[in-house]
Structure formats: C-alpha cells, structure tokens
C-alpha cells in the first residue's frame, strides 16, 4: 500500500528530497524531545496529607528534592 515508507517520512522529507537544514532541524528536535522525556521521567508531584498543598520534586540519589518547599516547612513523604 505505502511504497515509500511510513506516512510521516514523506511529510518530513518532501518525498525524499530534503535540505541539510531540514535534517539538522529534525535531529535537533529529536534530541530535545529525548532529553525532555528523560528528565521528566525523574520528576514527581505529590500532595501533603496534612495541608493538601501540592509539591513538585525530582528524584536524586539522596531522595526527593522538593522545589516549592520553604525552609520552615516539614513535609513527610510516605
């Protein structure tokens, strides 16, 4: 049915004829997408049971690093 490959290849490559700038832009977008997916896999959000406040964090080797916590807050993570 499709003689020239997947449906999107024709859209991105102008039926197989693409400029060098298109190739570099596609590579750049793939790298940015992969890096974003990798970084987002280490993020987490959770609600404090006592206050109901939503916290944003990232996983580190020492545990979760909470971004929007004030120094005086004591947040318990189950």
Image (cartoon, rainbow, N blue to C red):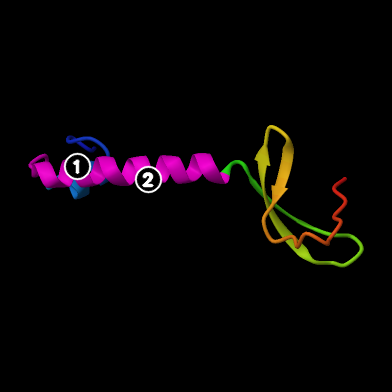
Against 71, is 28 above or below? above
Magenta-drawn stretch, dominant element (helix, strand or loop): helix
- Location of residue 43 in the rendering, given as x and y in whole percent from the top left corner: 63, 47
Report the residue marked by disc 1: 24
Look at the image and tell me in which quarter the C terminus lies: top right
Given residues 58 and 11, the one toward you in this image is 58
Residue located at (70% from left, 47% from top): 65
Disc number for residue 32: 2
- Location of residue 77 in the rendering, given as x and y in whole percent from the top left corner: 85, 48
**18 within the magenta span:** yes
Marks 1 and 2: CB-CB under 8 Å?
A: no
Q: Residues within 10 Å of mark 1 (few under 14, many from 20)?
A: few
Against 61, is 51 above or below? below
Say whether residue 7 is visible.
no
Helix, strand or loop for disc 1: helix
In the rendered image, the residue lying farthest to the top is: 61
Residue located at (18% from left, 35% from top): 3
Look at the image and tell me in which quarter the N terminus lies: top left
First reached walking from the N terminus: tag 1 or tag 2: 1
- 72 vs 45, left or right, is right
Q: Residues within 10 Å of mark 2 (few under 14, many from 20)?
A: few
Say whether residue 38 is visible.
yes
Residue range (magenta): 15-40
Helix, strand or loop for disc 2: helix
The picture quadrant where one finds residue 27 is: top left
Q: Find the distance from the CA under tag 1 to the CA under tag 2.
A: 12 Å
């Amino acid at each position: 049915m499709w003689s020239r490959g997947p449906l999107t290849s024709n859209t991105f490559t102008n039926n197989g004829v693409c400029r060098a700038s298109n190739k570099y832009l596609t590579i750049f977008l793939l790298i940015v997408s992969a890096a974003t997916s990798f970084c987002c896999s280490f993020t987490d959000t959770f609600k404090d049971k006592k206050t109901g406040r939503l916290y944003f964090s990232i996983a580190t080797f020492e545990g979760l690093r909470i971004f929007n916590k004030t120094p005086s807050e004591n947040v318990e993570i189950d």
